Amino acid sequence: MTTLTFIGAGMMASALAVPAYDNGHEIRIVGTHLDDEIVKRAKEDGYHLNMKRQLPDGFKWYYYDELEEGLYGADAVICGVSSFGVDWFLEEIYPKLDPKLPVLSVTKGMINKEDGSLLSYPEYWEEELAKKGIKRDICAVGGPCTSYELADKHHSLVGFCGTNIDDLKFFRDTFANDYYHVSISKDVRAVELSVALKNAYALAVSLAVGIAETEEGKEGVNHYNPQAALFAQSTREMGDLLELVNGDKNQLELGVGDLYVTIFGGRTRRIGTLLGRGYSYEKAMEELAGVTLESVVIAKRMGEAITVLADKDEVKKDKFPLLMHIYNMIANGAKLNIPWNKFNQEDLDN
């Protein structure tokens, strides 16, 4: 039996603990300073307030001030914070961990640097820790998987990535079972960028939902041709972005699967729908007051990176018309005007 300490009591980390528990491992979930209400209720009866699911009685729950107890004797740590907690985890948690202790992150996203280059969160953490003299290999999870369905033990196919093959195999063997299916890859940037991009492009596909609702004069209607067209353009641009960072395009399938899952509901679909109805970005954010949107963060960072690279003549903005339209709506107040004519391609080589 392996002892696993999850830091962050959010939905995905808590759901990921389910297959590991079913595999016979000890589960400890330590909430962050923002998770007190989740931990309080879970300590009482195992019910997760945000996921609205009853989790196994064998889970052990800890408040953040019980971190030391939760880490004692752990064989591995799972980072369960959202992208908004990346720097907090870097400053508050990593220095307290034995550098040899394997770490698996569920946090999806990326960092754009001033020169236009992109880093996955594992790469960012490893780079920043190295500046402090700490050498650490960090693995991560990517792929199409919603927390509540994983907690319900529906079949899920994901990818674990990392540069340390021994850690990768350890985590795969720890979590994989007959409903949680895990592939592994050493191409961290490709896997993590692929699944990060799905947030921005799920927002883009959801524009078609808002447009359909406006045209029909009611909510809940769908015009599938426009959605499919935006989905197709999204996958094309995601593949080109992977090539831009020298990533393996074989990992695109994880991002495409994640894109499929994300457009069916949640906060990303909601803001995309509002923008598709013609709301300005500011008005849409007022409607969603208090909601954190990773899709907006990713769209901004990718748009900024493409802009910098285009200014250096290293890439052409026209190669990413859908992404740049989303970026301009969010960052520059542009009005909805999907650039359909820029999606056309000619393949006359055959």
Image: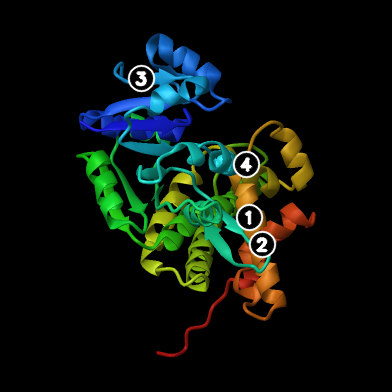
Q: Is residue 336 in view? A: no
Mark 1 and mark 4: Cα distance apart in space:
10 Å
**Residue at horizontal 41%, vertical 62%?**
252
Give the label on residue 299, or none: 1
Label 2 vs 4, first from the N-terminus: 4
Identity, as a three-letter code, of the amino acid under mark 3: Lys
Residue closest to the far front: 133
Helix, strand or loop at disc 1? helix
| Position of residue 93 in the picture relative to residue 141 (left or right) | right
Q: Nearer the viewer, mark 3 or mark 4?
A: 3
Q: Is residue 238 depicted above or below 130 in this figure?
A: below
Q: Position of residue 105 (x, y in %)?
A: 43, 44
Q: Nearer the viewer, mark 1 or mark 3?
A: 3
- Mark 2 packing: few (<14 Cα in 10 Å), some, or many (20+)? many
Q: Position of residue 314 (x, y in %)?
A: 63, 79
Helix, strand or loop at disc 2? helix
Q: Is there a contact, CB below 8 Å, between mark 1 and mark 3?
A: no
Mark 1 and mark 3: Cα distance apart in space:
37 Å
